[in-house]
Image (cartoon, rainbow, N blue to C red):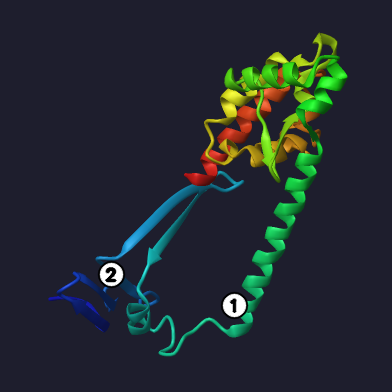
């Protein structure tokens, strides 16, 4: 004899979706049971600071089924104020991204500027920069029709040739989807980096290139963890 006492039950034979909300009289009476069929779900497991497992289950439930479950009302809609707040938030974030990009480009230089420092012609400097870029030893960012290069990646003690660490950092960073965008990469170089004790990656080429390379690897690992 079944000890289940149905509270709510619904099935859709066409989609194969359904749910059964019931109380099991054989239990202590403090819980109800919910069975779901045919819905997409995601799970993740993490560790709390105590060392215990923390499990998260995400169910994607169409609104009509959520209404049947009583999770939302019949006329549930996003309030206009919430939509406006979301739009304002996105606009603020977009503005911050533009400011960060401008700051990153401000740390870069055009071929002419680097040519002046290195004491060679603009044409020769541009030829070298293009060669180094093709070899994966440097990168550039285009802004308003002009091409900019990271001066901080060039060693003045070696005639403004790329620091060896730059090639390794680029080799690592292209493994991440985010950092294949050169503007994002330029922003990474100028930002305070927690892995580097809040120092900027662009300041590490001469002082501690190995630590810089480790920071690049950490950036890739962090991105992978975020996408997992």
Is residue 120 or residue 81 the one in the foreground? 120
Tag 2 residue: 35
Look at 68% across and 65% down and name the residue there.
Answer: 91
* In the rendered image, the vertical position of residue 161 relative to residue 6, given as above or below: above
Q: How many marks?
A: 2
Label 1 sits on residue:
83
Residue lying furthest bottom: 75
Residue 70 picture location, percent across and down = 39, 84
Q: Nearer the viewer, residue 138 or 130?
A: 130
Q: CA distance from mark 2 to mark 1?
A: 33 Å
**In the image shown, does 215 or 31 lie closer to the viewer?**
215
Relative to 69, 114 lies left or right = right
SS assignment at label 2: strand
The residue that appears at 32% across and 78% down in the rendered structure is 65
User: Eyeballing the image, is 197 above or below 226?
Assistant: above
Q: Residue at x 56, y 36 (%)?
A: 180
Image quadrant assignment for residue 194: top right
């Amino acid at each position: 004899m079944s000890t289940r006492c149905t509270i709510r039950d619904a099935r859709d034979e066409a989609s194969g979706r359904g749910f059964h909300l019931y109380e099991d009289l054989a239990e202590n009476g403090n819980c109800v049971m919910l069975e779901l069929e045919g819905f997409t779900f995601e799970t993740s497991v993490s560790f709390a600071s105590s060392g215990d497992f923390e499990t998260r289950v995400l169910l994607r439930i169409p609104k009509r089924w959520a209404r049947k479950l009583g999770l939302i009302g019949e006329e549930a809609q996003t309030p206009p104020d919430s939509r406006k707040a979301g739009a304002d938030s996105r606009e603020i974030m977009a503005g911050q991204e533009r400011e960060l990009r401008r700051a990153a480009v401000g740390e870069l230089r055009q071929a002419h500027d680097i040519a002046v420092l290195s004491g060679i012609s603009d044409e020769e400097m541009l030829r070298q920069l293009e060669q180094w870029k093709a070899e994966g030893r440097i990168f550039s960012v285009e802004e308003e029709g002009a091409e900019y290069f990271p001066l901080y990646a060039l060693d003045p003690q070696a005639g403004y040739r790329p620091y060896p660490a730059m090639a390794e950092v680029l080799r690592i960073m292209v493994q991440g989807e985010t950092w294949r965008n050169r503007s994002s990469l330029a922003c990474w170089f100028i930002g305070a980096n927690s892995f580097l004790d809040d120092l900027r990656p662009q300041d590490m080429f001469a002082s501690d290139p190995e630590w810089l390379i480790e920071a690049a690897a950490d950036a890739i690992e962090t991105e992978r963890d975020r996408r997992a």
